[in-house]
Image: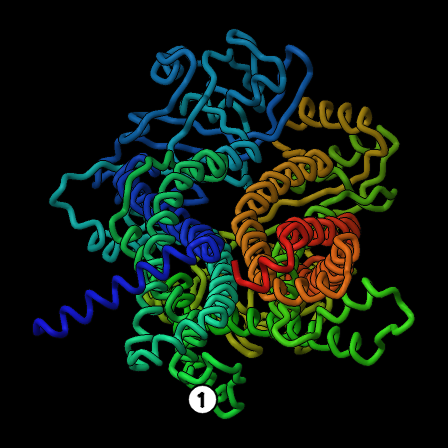
Amino acid sequence: MNLKNKTQLDWLLKMAWRDWRASRKKLYLFIASIILGISAVVAIQSFGSNLKVKIKEDSKSLMGADFIIDTRQAPTPKVLKIVDSLGYSAREINFASMAFFPKNGGNKLIKVSGFEGVFPIYGEVETVPVEAAKNYITSNGALVDATTMLQFNLNLGDSIKIGRVTLPIVGSLKSVPGKSAISASIMPPVFIPYSLIEATELIQKGSRLEYQYYFKTDSKTNLAKLEQELLPILDLESADLDTHTSAGKQLGEGYNNFGKFLNLVAFTALLLGCLGIASATNIYIKEKKKNIAVLKCIGLTRKQTFLIYLFQIIFIGFLGSLLGTLLGVTLQQLFPFLLKEFLPVNVAFSVIPSVIVLGLTLGIIMSVVFSLFPLISTWFVTPNQVLRAQDESNKKTKILAFIVGPTIGLTVFLFSYLLLGEFKATIIFLIGILVVFGLVRLIAGIFIKLIKNLFPKKWSFPARQGLSNLFRPGNQTIVLILCIGVGVFLINTLYLAKDTLISSTSFQKSNDTPNILLLDVQKPQIKPVSKTIQSFNQPVLDEIPVIAMKVHSINGIRATTLKQDSTNGIKNWVLEGQFRSSYRDSLIDSENLLEGEWIGEVNNPKIIPISIDIGFKKDAKLELGDHVVFNIQGVLMETEIKSIRRIEWSQMKMNFSVLFPKGALENAPQTNVLTTNAPSDSIAAKLQQTLVMNHPSVTVIDIRSVMGLVENILSKIAWVINFLALFSILTGFIVLIGAVRTSKFQRLQENAMLRTIGATSSQIFKMTAVEYILLGLFGALSGVTLSLIGAYFLSTYSFRTPFVISWMPVVLVPIIVTLAVTIIGLLNNRNIIKTSPKEILRGN
């Protein structure tokens, strides 16, 4: 850069700084919009990055070993040979069971784990007292989940009965590697010695057991190669191998969806902030057009005047980004506290340099991009606008839109793709945002047109004047309704969807709806268990066979091969997990046939026709006619998909993703599920106590208590969602204040003229009140209306639950928002009312 250019640049920067200092009050809310949007992005990105790092660092502690070999059936000789050759450090048998507490007669569904050897190899089992984690095996005692001990008022030395064994409680479990508070609340852990598992008499044919072997390796062992070599062999024996690296990656992917939701919250907050940026810059540049014309009169070129205001926007963007980044880094420290019940690790706070750079860069880019339209309009300002006002021609406006529109669209697309990481999800989200903005914009346009066409000429002067302000040139009606409508849409959609999800878990009380489930009932136990139920004068409502199975191959390709191909789109749970199926000759109320032909009964065919749920079809990438081979405890069974069903999972029915016809699985190893209805809590408690005492191998689930637990979990999730949505609400609120404040400067002269011709302060106050009441009302109503549609689609197609309207937000939100908008509008116009017309007209 030569000396002349440097001098010129210095002068332009000084001019930009001086102009900014003179007008900075008008742009404080511009900065606030950037601060909130960037703080949301930085806080969420920083937390997500720290979580990924922590999961990667603690992957061994989360698993408790370098790798695990596990199987859901008694290990075969080949599996035992592999296990012995590798030299395990610890082994475990775990299963779900009912526990009985003799102290108070209480019972609860728990997860029993019997350990032998050194567990965990990495990490710690935290207990009270501390030494209980090591001596419970030698003392033949039990470690019981700390929350369960509080729930049943248990103390050290009290007893727990599991199956046929009664053990003293020698310690309470505070923390287990890889377990979050939520998972522990669903099925609390109980540790007992491995040697006592057989004595419980719960290890029976058909019991849902898991055998796990924990291994430690040296740093030279190639875990990926080990997994590649052993997994195909173990798969043939219905066993699996998981390394700490693959488990950590899978756990990270599990929290990835939650991270995407957080990113959407941040992105929405930033979009609302960008809307505020565009609005504030537009008004700011309009007020500066005479200044720009003067600069051009004294010899400045188009480029120079453009650069003066571009430098201002860059500076404002940097300042807002810097403050937003600092606020985001501070807020990030709250996330581990807010989400501690959902996380398997304690996320330590650390500053991520890449996130800091992202926040600073993003704020500047978004500030410039969303200010482009008003900035480029400075190019068309002519010197003669010093003397007379000129409207921009239609042609020039179209040129600006042609330049700016694609730039904004591309920027938003790239940013959303950066956050979401999926092209399809990015497109769907952008289309959704555009549709919402477009609909609110349409509603605002219709609103203005209706006011014009149906103008109430008989209303009082203040009311007519207030209505006129909504469609006069330079009004902020569209922007305000957009800000209000989109903000209300976002929070109300989340609120309605959350309420729908909770309402879907509410238990319907009727005599023919089961509220007690009895799992793991063996065939010889069906009659005695049924007699126990009937002794309480309650019916056995259902008797359902259940068969455990794994996917062996899909269309001739082994599951192990499909698992290694990350491009096929098949979900891991389909290829890895063991799930349960059943057989029957007819569909039930909670099922609807979507495609194909339902076949209810067969006579030992070579290839068995099956029906699958639409969700299983999508996750497994299956179609009608595809062939799936299932491994049922070592027996391979080939099937062909003959029909697709949609299951209403919200109904209290025993539903299965994969359903076989009658005549296909009667001879397969199976357990049964019995259901009944207990009309009161007291009968339910006595029935469960009797079942646990007389049939200890049967797992009893009180659906009402489970539903209460689910509702509690959902309410905590809803609280977190509402907290995160505050980013968008606060940003929308700041944008609203900014839009109202910028409209104040446009009305100074108008109100001065009204005061000059005799309008009183009271009349101007009433005009403002009428205008903002209508703005708040129509903005809120448009947002609430669209949120009902959005929540319907979210509930129906994402949650797959019937949509239920929660009337409280539908009624209260328009009232609250209308009041807020009116108050903000009146407060922001207070100075206009107090300022004398002479001062305004003179520009002092």
Figure quadrant of residue 446? bottom right
Figure quadrant of residue 780? bottom right
Extreme residue toward the bottom, this view = 395
At horizontal 79% and vertical 57% (from top left) the residue drawn is: 763
Where's the N terminus, which quadrant? bottom left
Residue 807 visible from this viewpoint? yes
Q: Nearer the viewer, residue 298 or 527?
A: 298
At horizontal 51% and vertical 71% (from top left) the residue drawn is: 430
Task: Describe residue 23's horizontal placement relative to residue 106 as left or right.
Answer: left
Extreme residue toward the right, this view = 458
Q: Nearer the viewer, residue 560 or 811?
A: 811
For residue 360, above or below residue 101 = below
Q: Secondary structure at mark 1?
A: helix
Q: Where residue 50 appears, x then y in whole percent?
A: 33, 44
Q: Where residue 653 appears, x then y in whole percent?
A: 73, 51
Extreme residue toward the left, this view = 2
Residue 803 visible from this viewpoint? no
For residue 680, above or below residue 170 = below
At horizontal 60% and vertical 55% (from top left) the residue drawn is: 667
The residue type indicated by label 1 comes to Ile
Extreme residue toward the top, this view = 157
Q: Which residue was labeled with disc 1?
A: 399
Q: Nearer the viewer, residue 646 or 768?
A: 768
Q: Where residue 153 appears, x then y in whole percent?
A: 61, 13
Q: Residues within 10 Å of mark 1 (few under 14, many from 20)?
A: few
Q: Total label count?
A: 1
